[in-house]
Image (cartoon, rainbow, N blue to C red):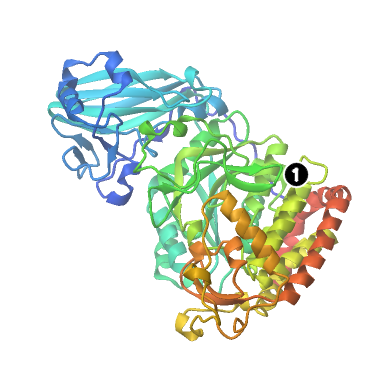
């Protein structure tokens, strides 16, 4: 692999050209846009009555829209993703509003996230340049952090020939939140928008150079499609240094036809690195390592292998990162690959007291931008600050990597969160930038808290807290961990419970084993998990005995599924008591019921002595059976280990902090890579 010393790139000069306007966001209009995502780009304004319009004074050109608004029963603007009867995108990728209709660019991908530019850059003005023709008007709006919509400008269109319109818009009022966007309204004839760009006046004109790192494991077709998409976009290629595909599976990307197509364009820029499976942290650390070693790129863009990327978002992320006050990690949002206008989270944050990740405060999980568009969803107008960004799409300055190191050797889970926290403590913020996004398989289609993956959830959560928790004993984490383990036991998930105890023991053993465990822990985890019923899944329910009980359910009601807290608490209390009683007759020979994954709450499973439980992806099921000896033994060990964790926390935290620099160093990772390559 060559010498371990880093090739340090010369710092980019921000004075390579005179001041001018740099395009930071282009409006996206595509005739080939699929209907199920069109609402993320452009929408039909089906009702426009609002306090902003009523108080601003409508021009004569707005009269057709006024009539439409008067007939509307709902005063909230909503987006019609089909645009039928309102507008269309023609073969030249121009947006056309039909006579007397209005279309809006106040959408996820085409509104301008003014508050993020206000907060993280030094600029106070953005320039909007529009090229349009026809009869009608362009109406520019801005919003406040409260979601109030204010008209910023109204520009008449009165020419069949294209005209260029320029407006300089202030960023001053956006300190807490808010967006800019515009609508295109047609009067007595069609109105056409040919292009629109948002620009910043700056002398920092040089576009940052990017290397892309993709970690893949047995998704060759998906990864090949992504490479082809990159190779077909000239503006992305123009900023690209290298593409590193770290292939950790046995189904190789190079064996696909799509790889050959991408290689023909990318040539020597495309690097396939075959290595043993080190998980996401090992794959992405390899991409970081290779990029920093070459010393050419300003950024490493980390992408999951199973995503579809809006390539315009990469350019926006680079432009934003180029112009921030200090080196900044810029992340993209994740939309569902199956329900493609649904966003996973608007920002990622950690609850420090319980030390668990989740949607950032003041946001809502799984928001559907088509059903609740920007203009009618007040909380979307707040600026959301994050603790980290997911590595499904994350642009990391190479200067940050040189300063804080690579990922911790965590295999999977918590590596991106820990890296973001570490960067923040070193003075490098993370921003999740609206308008930059990928589509990814949603978390609802899997449950990675069970089986062998529970080890990495538990171990890495504890390690990241030992490194970064502001509380002397990790806040409530030791209790949370023990409660989570107890829930697994009353759910008859003894394999998962045993794996959680192993993770806890490994954390207590100290940080020294983390690199060596990268390649060797997973096979043992799979073997350990396979000893238990809850990990022995089959795709066919007919292979299990039919549900049967010696006595029918009391009063025919079966096991309830409470929806309120008192009911859940009652179920939990009585379920815990059941764990020390003998299992019911016949429960070891016959399941007592079939429990869909949606209903497998721990407080319900605690009332079964055996049950067929389906997996989150709906492809298989396992037969859970209650075992008093397993429950008693694991609870005893869990109590002892968690007591040690709490008591030893200060000393253990100091050990992990002392080891952090070596664990994340290029030299340590190089040794791991070379050990695997031998």
Front-most of 47 and 20?
47
User: Where's the N terminus, which quadrant?
Assistant: bottom right
Would you identify the image quadrant in which residue 216 lies? bottom right
Kindly tell me whether residue 462 is visible in this rendering. yes
- Residue at (39% x, 64% y) in the render: 261
Would you identify the image quadrant in which residue 100 lies? top left
User: Where's the C terminus, which quadrant?
Assistant: bottom right
Front-most of 426 and 99?
99
Q: How many marks?
A: 1
User: Can you give x and y, in whole percent of width and height, for residue 36 in the image?
Assistant: 31, 51
Task: Give the residue furthest to the front.
Answer: 555
Query: Pointer 1: residues within 10 angstroms few (<14), some, or many (20+)?
Result: some
Residue 633, above or below 331: below
User: Can you give x and y, in whole percent of width and height, for residue 52 in the image?
Assistant: 32, 19
Residue 10, above or below 274: above
Residue 305, above or below 403: below
Would you identify the image quadrant in which residue 60 lies? top left
Q: Secondary structure at mark 1?
A: helix
Kindly tell me whether residue 5 is visible in this rendering. no
Front-most of 601 and 416?
601
User: Which residue is disc 1 drawn over?
Assistant: 468
**Relative to 2, 91 lies left or right:** left
- Residue at (68% x, 78% y) in the render: 527
**Relative to 518, 120 lies left or right:** left
User: Can you give x and y, in whole percent of width and height, for residue 248 in the image?
Assistant: 59, 68
- Residue at (28% x, 22% y) in the render: 165
Task: Give the residue furthest to the left.
Answer: 188
**Relative to 530, 305 lies left or right:** left
User: Can you give x and y, in whole percent of width and height, for residue 352 in the image?
Assistant: 70, 42
């Amino acid at each position: 692999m060559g010498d371990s010393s880093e090739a340090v790139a010369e710092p980019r000069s921000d004075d390579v050209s005179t001041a001018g306007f740099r395009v930071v966001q282009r409006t996206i209009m595509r005739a080939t846009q699929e209907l199920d995502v069109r609402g993320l780009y452009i929408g039909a304004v089906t009702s426009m009555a609002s306090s902003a319009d009523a108080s601003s004074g409508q021009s004569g050109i707005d009269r057709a829209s006024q009539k439409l608004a008067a007939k509307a029963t709902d005063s909230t603007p909503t987006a019609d993703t089909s645009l039928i009867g309102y507008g269309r995108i023609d073969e030249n990728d121009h947006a056309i509003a039909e006579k007397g209709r209005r279309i809006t660019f106040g959408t996820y991908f085409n509104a301008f996230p003014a508050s993020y530019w206000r907060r993280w850059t030094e600029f106070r003005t953005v320039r909007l340049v529009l090229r349009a023709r026809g009869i009608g008007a362009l109406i520019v709006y801005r919003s406040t952090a409260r979601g109030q919509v204010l008209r910023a400008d109204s520009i008449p269109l009165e020419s069949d020939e294209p005209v260029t319109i320029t407006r300089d818009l202030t960023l001053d009022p956006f300190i807490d939140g808010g967006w800019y966007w515009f609508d295109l309204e047609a009067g007595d004839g069609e109105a056409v928008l040919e292009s629109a760009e948002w620009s910043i006046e700056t002398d920092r004109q040089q576009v940052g150079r990017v290397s892309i790192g993709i970690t893949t494991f047995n998704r060759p077709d998906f990864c090949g499609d992504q490479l082809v998409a990159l190779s077909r976009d000239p503006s992305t290629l123009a900023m690209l240094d290298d593409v590193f595909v770290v292939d950790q599976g046995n189904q190789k990307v190079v064996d696909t036809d799509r790889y050959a197509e991408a290689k023909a364009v990318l040539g020597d820029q495309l690097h396939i690195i075959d290595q043993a499976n080190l998980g996401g942290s090992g794959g992405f650390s390899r991409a970081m390592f290779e990029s920093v070693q070459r010393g050419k790129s300003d950024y490493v863009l980390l992408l999951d292998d199973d995503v579809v990327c809006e390539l315009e978002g990469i350019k926006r992320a680079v432009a934003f990162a180029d112009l921030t006050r200090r080196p900044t990690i810029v992340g993209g949002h994740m939309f569902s690959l199956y329900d493609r206008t649904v966003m996973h989270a608007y920002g990622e944050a950690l609850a420090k007291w319980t030390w668990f990740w989740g949607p950032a405060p003041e946001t809502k999980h799984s928001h559907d931008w088509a059903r609740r568009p920007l203009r009618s969803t007040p909380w979307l107008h707040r600026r959301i600050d994050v603790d980290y960004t997911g590595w499904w799409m994350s642009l990391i300055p190479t200067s940050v990597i040189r300063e804080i190191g690579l990922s911790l050797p965590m295999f999977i889970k918590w590596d991106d969160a820990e890296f973001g926290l570490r960067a923040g403590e070193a003075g490098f913020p993370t921003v999740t930038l609206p308008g930059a996004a990928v589509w990814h398989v949603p978390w609802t289609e899997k449950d990675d808290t069970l089986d062998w993956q529970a080890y990495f959830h538990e171990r890495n959560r504890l390690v990241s807290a030992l490194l970064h928790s502001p509380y002397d004993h990790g806040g409530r984490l030791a209790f949370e961990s023990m409660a989570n383990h107890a829930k697994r036991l009353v759910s008859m998930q003894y394999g998962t419970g045993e794996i959680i105890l192993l993770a806890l023991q490994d954390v207590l053993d100290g940080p020294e084993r983390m690199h060596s465990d990268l390649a060797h822990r997973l096979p043992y985890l799979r073997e350990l998990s396979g000893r238990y019923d809850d990990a022995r899944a089959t795709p066919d329910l007919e292979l299990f005995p039919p549900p049967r009980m010696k006595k029918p359910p009391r009063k025919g009601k079966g096991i309830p599924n409470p929806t309120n807290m008192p009911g859940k608490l009652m179920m939990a209390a009585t379920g815990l008591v059941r764990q020390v009683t003998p299992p019911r007759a016949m429960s070891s020979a016959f399941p007592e019921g079939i429990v869909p994954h949606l209903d497998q709450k721990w407080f319900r499973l605690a009332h079964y002595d055996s049950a067929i439980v389906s997996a989150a992806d709906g492809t298989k099921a396992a037969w859970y059976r209650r075992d008093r000896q397993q429950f008693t033994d694991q609870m005893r060990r869990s109590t002892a280990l968690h007591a040690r964790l709490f008591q030893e926390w200060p000393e253990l935290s100091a050990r992990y902090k002392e080891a952090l620099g070596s664990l994340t160093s290029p030299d340590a990772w190089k040794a791991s890579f070379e050990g695997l390559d031998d």
